Image (spheres, coloured by chain):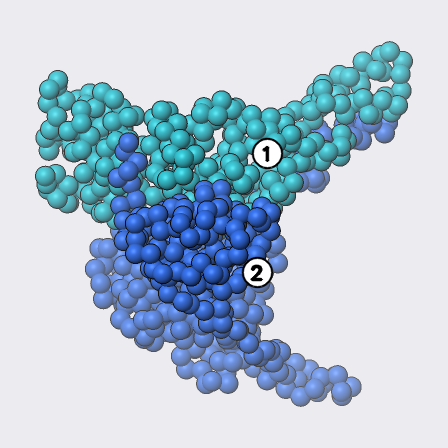
Amino acid sequence: MNADVAALLEALESQAYLADRGLATAVHLARSLGRPLLLEGDAGVGKTELAKVLATIGQAELVRLQCHEGLDRDQALYSWDHARQLLQLRALEASGERPADHVGALYDERFLLERPLLRALRLGEGAVLLVDEIDRADDEFEAFLLELLADGQVSVPELGTITTPTMPLVVLTSNRTRELSDALKRRCLYHWIGHPDRAREIAIIRVRAPAVPEALARRVATMVARLRGMDLYKPPGVAESIDWARVLTAQLGAGVVEPDAELVGDTLGVVVKDHDDLQRVHAAFDELLAS
Amino acid sequence: MPTDDVRADGPSDRGVVAGGAEPAPGEPASSEPASGEPASGEPASGEPPSGEPAPGELAPGEQRPPGPAEGTLGVQLLGEALRASGVAVGTGQLVRCRRAVRVLGGQDLADRYWAARTTMITDPGDLDVFDRVFQVLAARAGEPHRSRGAARGPTHDTPEAHEGPDSHIEVGAPGEDGEDGERGAIVGARASAHERLRHRRFDRASDEERAQIAALIDQLPTVLPRRRARRRRPGAGGTLDVERTLRRALHTDGELITHATRRRVDRPRRVVLLLDVSGSMTVYAGALLRLGIALRRGAARDASQRVEVFAFATRLTRLTEALGAEDPDAAIAAAAGEVRDWDGGTRIGAAVDGLVRTWGRRGVLRGAVVVCCSDGLERGDPDLLAAAMARLQRTAHRVVWVNPLAGGDGFAPTQRGMVAALPHVDVFLPGHDLAAIEDLVAVLRAAR
């Protein structure tokens, strides 16, 4: 294995994020090639969490842009502080100046409100830019973002061009509610985060919830794997496994590691969060519990 | 470290046969080709180092022309093989892959696997293909291969079959004669021909009439349903637009004289067509497919992305991509080719369930207007259909059921499937003739 990738894996693990080799390689490449990293995968597999951990590791600031429909420049890049601009106008007026002579002073950096994209560009390497759920934004925003990421600069008409000193590490996540444009995908490095295999899931539970006994972690991982095989509307993610393990640990008395059928049934809502799914699971309850 | 039990299905466990995993043409070989290569203790596959000129001397950005690549798991070759397997790989991605391999050192097959996968694949649906292709190439590395010519995909020479709008309806040539009475008669004849076609049942129409109906559907004034958007645009009424107001004030020495406002705008909703293509339903499905294509060509800027089409008989198939074709007939032909079970038995419940499960989970159905077209003759379990329809209705904005049987006299929705589905349907329509399709267009327009 490439030494840098191995080091990255270790660093991630030190922050209780157990990545697999593919993901670590993708992050390493994103850094060394200066490309954005596009992460896709089911809900709850740790896409957003990765960006947070990367920020911690790199001692960088996590700059998060949560995408939604109708997201525009004002919310994503910058906007002007109109209230303060107005005050400035009035102040000028009161001192007998003609405000029209001071338009330039009005569009000063002092009145510029940084939004996530601008903040990340200014911080450069000191930032991890997380563009969360890019698939929820409009396609025109996608094109705008692409341009920004390609040039590493943005032009503010009143101020001129703001260029980033160094490219921040950019992580985009998508839940695939719509196909992203090919242009964006090709510009990015791409990694699909799947559900972890059983051994990794056990390890993740143990790292994230140290109070959970190993035997219980194994049990939870087995049952969650079975749940994922039941073709549910909302298959549980790793986040659910961790929650479930925590809840079961709290409910079980000290020294007991084997949850009985009643306890599993009572706490099922922690992992299965859909009425139809619950019915389906209850119908196959014995199968779920089989050891 | 728990990382080692990962990727049980990764390439490293797959019998690393690629003794010749050597930097492809276009990458500077970072090691001595003679000694550094078969590091994994594999059969050294007798690769001829002759193809590699003196390594290590290339500038980082430089690309070697693809020379004889025997015995290498070349990036170029991998890219071509992927393209031949239907994965779109751009030249930029190839270049980036080479750089990625170089960054990782290019020694380890698993490193190469991840480098290539991360840079070349952008769709999880392509992962299986990638794994297969990579495995084959890794296994074959060492054998001589020259697949450049074969890797090229089939060229698509689609015959341009545009014949323009049908002229059958135009009885005579209006405008040539000046007499009003005759012109009136012609217009009347045209109108009645249209009227007759409007009420011609699709299944009883002759081929010629079907072509005319198809042309009429293509020209329907289709509008996607709308919904409120978050964004606001400049416009009268609505809320104060501080930014523009301030800009205006600048021209008047800071005096706020006129107020700029902005208001909410509408955006198109997604329309999802779910078409039963079993047995006798084919002809109706064809008509709705045309409607779907017409909707895609609608006026809204991103109309083409707002229409999804699925077909089913026993299995659910996504047809949306087949709709991209310019020519509706070609699109329908392509769609027919794609639905393998065209004219098979009907399992509506399983189809709706599959739609809700796989596509609903991704959010395709959320806020959409879903149009199901089926006769409701369910061979599967009606309970499954009822449950799936209930789910569909909860997820989607509106559910429209189009049942061509409802166009017949004395129709009552007594079919097992219809009985199960009806409680979960917002609008129930017949879909047997052009007039019914026009009604559907009106329903779509009105759904907000």
For the residue carrying disc 1, how many other residues have a C-alpha within 10 Å: few (<14), some (14-19), or many (20+)? many
Q: Position of residue A104 (x, y in %)?
A: 82, 25
**Residue at the (49%, 68%) spot, across then down:** B148
**Residue at the (86%, 27%) spot, across then down:** B252
Looking at the picture, tell me which residue is in the foreground, A66 or B21: B21
Q: Amino acid at mark 1?
A: Met
* Subunit that carries the residue with mark 2: B
Query: Is residue B364 visible to the viewer in this orientation of the structure?
Result: no
Q: Position of residue A11 (x, y in %)?
A: 39, 27
Colour seen for chain B: blue
Looking at the picture, tell me which residue is in the foreground, B217 or A208: A208
Between circles 2 and 1, the one closer to the viewer is 2
Q: Amino acid at mark 2?
A: Pro
* Subunit that carries the residue with mark 1: A
Q: Position of residue A47 (x, y in %)?
A: 41, 36
Q: Mark 2: which secondary structure?
A: loop
